[in-house]
Image (cartoon, grey):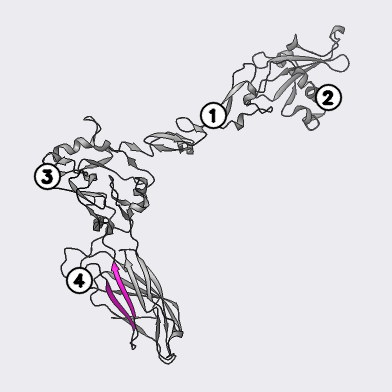
Amino acid sequence: MAVKLPGLCLLLLVLLGLSWAKKHPCPIFAKSCEECIQSGPECGWCTKYTNTHCNTVKYLQRAGCRNHHIYNPQGSLQILQNYSSSDTADGSSLFLQPQQVSLHLRPAVSQSFPLTISTPTDQPITELTLETSEVPAGINITFSSVQRGSPLMMQVNVEAAGCPNTSDSVNQNQTGPWSIQITPRGFTVSLKLEITLQCRCSCTQHRQEKSPDCNGFGSLVCGRCYCEKNLAGSRCQLLSDEFLTRDERHCRRDETKPLCSGRGTCVEGTCQCNRRPNPAEGYSGAFCECSNFDCPYHNNSICGGNGRCECGKCICDPLWTGESCECSMDTTSCLAKNQQVCNGRGFCECGACRCTDPKFSGPTCEECPFCPGRCTALHNCVECWVSGLGPSRCASECGQYNVTMVATHDELYDPKKMPNLCKFWFKDLCSLFFAVPFPGQSTIPALLQCDQPDPASRFSFSFADV
């Protein structure tokens, strides 16, 4: 069969009549390692004794199978012979580099390598031919042109569609190796490909008879028990005549609960938990009773984004607590100006102060609206506003406060809204009244009265101090 090089992508499909197994998702109930890895390149097999053997690598890792116990071959490529054209004496003949390549192919996982073809200028290459004797169906070889001219640079891609059906006896050599010759038409020089399919598991060669993991009544192969006659169960723990009636009891927490908590399938007395559409979510436990996603949320995040979900309960990260890990144990936000937690007058809870002294309030328990001296502390601010200097001139005295002038005492003071009332002498024959705001309030109402004052009141004082 010849394939023309000028095309951007040249495809060779060798057909010898063998049937191949179809690709399908990872079968979690696969009976053998071979059945598992042949189902798709994403499927791996846990070679250590566990409840789950066949699944995706990520799922097996989450289930507790360590990487060195996961068999998931992805193929390999080895250059066996790779002389350069400078090593040959005759520069007038065609030259291929490399000369020999060995490929181990996992079905549906491609392997690629570059091929350089150097030719005499008077003998252009027009076609390539492939000799494919004793090669099973499903080996796909494609070429793509990387650089035209001489030397001609090609990219060779090789992929196996699947593993041969073991029930087909036409070809006894099921996995290779097979040899393929890639030869430019009109020349004798060729590239030799040796292809082997990775359809079998190396762990099958290590069979442990009467394994303790199988209670001494079965053989452990690739982490799975193959029980002796009349025995069944994942660990050969059941009599086969009792198995059909007893296995479901091993898959229930008690007689009132559904099989595998309604989240899995009972297989030989062992729960195989269902897979979730989201690969990051999963069920676990002997009865699939646990999950890693059914936990309280806070701020639209599971466990507040400050912990992990285990069996429906949040396990919080350090410095976080609470049912949904919503409460920070960091006291930085509770430090007062004196560097005491909540000014020594409260305790820090979830990053906020809870004041225990009723006279103190505020974010760090530093505000004391009923404490003596509040009138004096606000006097300069109010006097600045009343003097008509305005917010820009009074900012240094007032900070966040705004002073609003009122006309009557009824507007000035409401004991339900203001903690206390202050009175100061202001210029000639005038008294200045203002109310101290509660924490969180920014407006200070003030009243200026300029009637004839009592001579005894010609000094500053606060009603809160009397």
Q: Position of residue 159 (x, y in %)?
A: 32, 68
Residue 417 is covered by the magenta coloring: no
Q: Earlier in the sequence, mark 3 or mark 1?
A: 3
Residue 187, x across and y down, in percent? 34, 88
Q: Quadrant of the C terminus?
A: top right
Chain-order first, disc 2 or disc 3: 3
How far is disc 4 from disc 1 in space, using C-alphas? 71 Å
Task: Say what amino acid the circle numbered 2 marks.
Answer: Ser
Q: Is residue 422 above or below residue 27?
A: above
Secondary structure beneath label 4: loop
Magenta residues span 174-197
Q: Secondary structure at mark 1?
A: loop
Residue 13, compared with residue 444, is above or below; it is below
Confirm or deny contact between disc 4 and disc 1 (CB under 8 A): no
Residue 406 appears in the figure: no
The CA distance from mark 3 to mark 1 is: 61 Å
| Mark 4 residue type | Gly
**Residue type indicated by callout 1:** Cys
Measured in 3D between alpha carbons, the distance from the residue under mark 2 to the one under mark 3, in whole angstroms, is 104 Å
